[in-house]
Amino acid sequence: MKTMTAACALTLAAGAASASLTITEIWAGGVSGTEQTADWVEITNFGNSSVSFSGVYYDDDSADATKDDEVFGIGSIAAGESVIVLVSWEDNWGSATDALDAFAAVWGAGNLAGVQIGYVDGGSGLGGGGDAAYFFDGNTSAAATLASQSYAGPALPASFIYNPGTISFGDLAQGGVYGAYTSDQPASDDGTFAIGSPGVVPAPMSAAVLGLGGLAAMRRRR
Ligand SMILES: [Ca+2]
Ligand SMILES: [Ca+2]
Ligand SMILES: [Ca+2]
């Protein structure tokens, strides 16, 4: 408990001093067959003030800000807000609108009410055998990293999550834990459903300090 409290204090201090964006969930597409929802990343602002998210560029584990893969659809992320960014949707959809519609159908429009959902124009896919997501403030080699997260595989029909209890990333989402639920529609054309919590943000410090566990999961609505 002492270690966990110290880690919280460190995180809060870092958040106050600089960037406050944290990647809190990654869906790498852990299903066989043709995916019915694009790979996506959830980003949460754990800071106390809004953060601009325009002119932001994405890459996977090659971590190259100069690759011209701009994020569209999200102007800023408010304090406490969690947003979703679809990546590599061109594999299965002809337009971003179609990919956004497919995402909403699979995960449930009702579950996503009030959640900002953007998309990368192009961009590398997130591999099921381990990969990483990077978001840069610009597309020059000097661009600052706003948020990044690597993960190990294998991807199963569940997203990789930020676990507020252990303050670490990489656990697979479990239904009913930290707000995760089974998708409204199959995530693959073979009928496999998925488990995730797009737009649902576990309260990171209350879970660790107060020991509330799964009860700390809460849905943010704007
Ligand atoms: Ca993938
Ligand atoms: Ca990749
Ligand atoms: Ca989530």
Image (cartoon, helix red, strand yellow):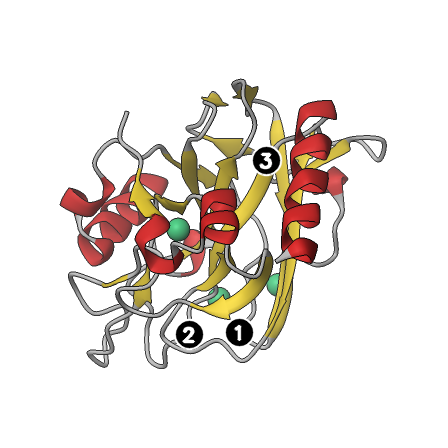
The answer to whether residue 90 is above or below residue 121 is below
Specify the quadrant of the image occupied by residue 114: top left
Indicate the amino acid at tag 3.
Leu
Task: Give the percent coordinates (x, y) of residue 107.
Answer: 24, 55
In the rendering, which numbered label is found on residue 128? Answer: 1
Mark 2 or mark 3, earlier in chain: 3
Say which of marks 2 and 3 sits in front: 3
Quadrant, the C terminus? top left
Mark 2–mark 1 distance (CA, rounded to whole Å):
6 Å
- Dots 2, 3 in contact, CB < 8 A: no
| Among numbered discs 1 and 3, the one appearing first in the sequence | 3
Disc number lying in front (1 or 3): 3
Q: Amino acid at mark 2?
A: Gly
Q: Which residue is mark 2?
A: 30
Query: Which callout, 2 or 1, points at the residue further toward the start of the chain?
Result: 2
Tell me which residue sits at (22%, 63%) in the image: 183
The residue furthest right is 142
Camera sees residue 134: no
State the CA–CA distance, disc 1 to disc 3.
24 Å
Q: Is residue 214 left or right of residue 53?
A: left
Q: Position of residue 143 (x, y in %)?
A: 78, 30
- Vertical side of 177 occupied by 58: above or below: above
**Label 1 beta carbon within 8 A of ligand 1:** yes
Q: Position of residue 93 (x, y in %)?
A: 34, 54
Q: Is residue 25 left or right of residue 63?
A: left
Point out the quarter of the image occupied by ligand 2.
bottom right
Of residue 88 and residue 194, the one placed in the foreground of this image is: 194
The disc at residue 21 is 3
Report the amino acid beneath label 1. Gly
Residue at the extreme front of the image, as rendered: 2
